[in-house]
């Protein structure tokens, strides 16, 4: 029988209250190093999160986060009620400290014993902090659902999606986004692209004009264009989408596509006067507003702004949400909130063309939300991202010393950097990718040739404070070579 031992007890180690590292990080590193150095051996049982939190006088969530990091990197495994153990079959390679020159686990490596190592390239856009995802908890919820899935649920998810998930989404939107809706208005989709496709097949006719933010999310722009829409590029200024200019360019447009909470990619919030002007235009014109609530969960220094949908008295806003950024991209689950008058239309198209999203994942997400894990996860991620955002900004300022200006947005999951003097962003990105880095160009978000701004989009989600300086130095070497 495996004994329970804590590396915190070895050599009388205690956390350092004066350290700049958060407590969860200190605990994580202590366990990791104990496993690498053979102090804790494969198969050895670790103390429970509750017991360890008691030893430290800390919140259990702190230990849970440390254990999640260790599990995601393959050092430990959970065995349900049996407890948590050092993973079996750890090779000497995984026990050695990572090769920092290769951008190891601290820059986004996810591994399990006996499997190839997956590395998320630093600065990769659209990828949440997978090293901090509660994989053990998710595994328990998934296993429980797989064991207890009811026969009626296995048949399908109905015309609009799994009802408990829709109920959970309503509760979340009411509290976090200020949206007054009921479960009958919520339609579950296969991610963001699935939601956009469902909307275009339901509402869009060939050559309908659509106002589209410029710069704006190019994947959405391409999808709308492929569906037959005529894109009307509309400038974005310090107040968000320029509604007056949009009316001037296309007064009879049938749609407007906006990211009002956190404009993609500039991070600007649509001001209240612009929001009211947009809603007034839509009501007069009987036009539709597609609200992509992009990165709305992650705002630093203040609470997230209410959704545009929360002001929609005329029933003209089609609200799109997704779990890809707040949970993980491979989940491929999203949702729509549509006006009562349009629910039957949307459900009919969904039934004919899609037949729903994977039911098992819908049940797991419903449990994750209804049991309070979702709200806690977002809160933890907001704190983690604020820390990673600040550390990356400091590293960029230190290494580039004025050669790269960084725009600190109010929220979101990336920074925007601009070289001084300006340089072609496509060339900079190509050189960075040749060195294993994955920033993105700002210019590709613009629809109008020759009108684009030059800049570099730098995601900070998978760059830890410990690795930020090293990663930025790699970026400098890529650009100076």
Image (cartoon, helix red, strand yellow):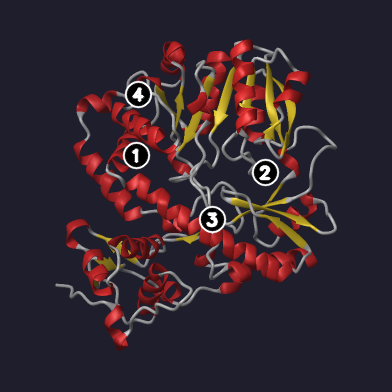
Task: First in sequence, mark 1 or 2: give its number.
Answer: 2
x and y percentages locating residue 481 in the rendered image: 79, 67
CA gap between label 4 and label 1 equals: 16 Å
Q: Residue at x 73, y 53 (%)?
A: 429
Task: First in sequence, mark 4 or 1: give its number.
Answer: 4
Circle 4 residues within 10 Å: few <14, some 14–19, many ≥20:
some
Residue carrying label 4: 183
Q: Nearer the viewer, mark 4 or mark 1?
A: 4
CA gap between label 2 and label 3 equals: 17 Å
Determine the image quadrant of residue 86: bottom left
Disc marking residue 365: 1
What secondary structure is marked by label 1? helix
CA gap between label 1 and label 3 equals: 22 Å
Report the front residue among 128 and 338: 338
What secondary structure is marked by label 3? loop
Q: Is residue 58 above or below residue 365?
A: below
Disc marking residue 266: 2
- How many labels were placed on the picture? 4
Report the front residue among 312 and 474: 312
Residue carrying label 3: 461
Q: Is residue 299 above or below residue 249?
A: below
Question: Is the Cβ of the residue at disc 1 closer than 8 Å to that at disc 2?
Answer: no
Q: Can residue 452 be seen in this view?
A: yes
Q: In this view, does 93 lie above or below 254?
A: below
Task: First in sequence, mark 2 or 3: give its number.
Answer: 2
CA gap between label 3 and label 4 equals: 32 Å
x and y percentages locating residue 104 in the rendered image: 53, 67
Q: Nearer the viewer, mark 1 or mark 2?
A: 2
Task: First in sequence, mark 2 or 4: give its number.
Answer: 4
Q: Is residue 454 left or right of residue 153?
A: right
Q: Nearer the viewer, mark 2 or mark 3?
A: 2
């Amino acid at each position: 029988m495996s004994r329970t031992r804590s590396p915190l007890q070895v050599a009388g180690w205690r956390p350092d209250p004066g350290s700049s590292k958060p407590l969860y990080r200190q605990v994580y590193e202590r366990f990791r190093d104990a496993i690498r150095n053979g102090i804790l051996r494969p198969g050895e049982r670790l103390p429970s999160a509750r017991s360890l939190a008691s030893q430290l006088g800390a919140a259990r969530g702190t230990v849970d986060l440390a254990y999640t990091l260790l599990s995601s990197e393959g050092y430990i495994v959970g065995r349900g009620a049996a407890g948590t153990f050092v993973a079996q079959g750890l090779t000497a390679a995984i026990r050695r400290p990572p090769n920092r020159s290769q951008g190891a686990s601290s820059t986004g490596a996810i591994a399990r014993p006996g499997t190839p190592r997956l590395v998320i390239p630093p600065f990769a856009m659209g990828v949440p902090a997978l090293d901090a995802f509660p994989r053990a908890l998710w595994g328990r919820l998934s296993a429980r659902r797989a064991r207890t899935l009811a026969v009626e649920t296995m048949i399908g998810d109905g015309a609009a999606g799994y009802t408990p998930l829709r109920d959970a989404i309503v509760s979340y939107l009411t509290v976090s986004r200020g949206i007054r809706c009921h479960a009958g208005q919520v339609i579950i989709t296969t991610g963001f692209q699935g939601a956009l496709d469902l909307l275009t097949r339901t509402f869009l006719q060939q050559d309908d004009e659509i106002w589209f933010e410029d710069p704006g999310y190019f994947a959405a722009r391409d999808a709308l264009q492929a569906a037959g829409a005529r894109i009307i590029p509309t400038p974005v200024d310090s107040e968000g989408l320029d509604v007056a200019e949009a009316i001037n360019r296309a007064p009879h447009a049938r749609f407007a596509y906006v990211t009002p909470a956190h404009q993609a990619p500039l991070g600007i919030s649509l001001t209240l006067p612009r929001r009211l002007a947009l809603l007034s235009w839509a009501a007069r014109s009987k036009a539709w507003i597609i609200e992509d609530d992009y990165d709305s969960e992650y705002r630093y220094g203040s609470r997230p702004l209410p959704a545009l949908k929360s002001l929609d008295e005329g029933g003209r806003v089609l609200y799109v949400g997704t779990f890809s950024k707040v949970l993980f991209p491979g989940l491929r689950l999203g949702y729509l909130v549509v006006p009562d008058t349009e629910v039957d239309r949307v459900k009919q198209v969904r039934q004919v063309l899609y037949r729903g999203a994977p039911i098992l994942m819908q049940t797991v997400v419903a449990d994750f939300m209804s049991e309070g894990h979702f709200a806690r996860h977002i809160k933890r991620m907001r704190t983690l991202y604020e820390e990673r955002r600040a550390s990356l900004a400091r590293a960029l300022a230190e290494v580039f010393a004025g050669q790269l200006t960084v725009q600190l947005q109010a929220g979101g999951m990336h920074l925007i950097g601009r070289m001084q003097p300006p340089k072609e962003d496509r060339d900079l990105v190509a050189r960075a990718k040749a060195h294993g880095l994955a920033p993105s160009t700002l210019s590709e978000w613009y629809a109008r040739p020759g009108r684009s701004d030059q800049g570099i989009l730098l995601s900070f989600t998978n760059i830890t404070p410990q690795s930020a300086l090293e990663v930025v130095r790699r970026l400098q070497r890529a650009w100076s070579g």
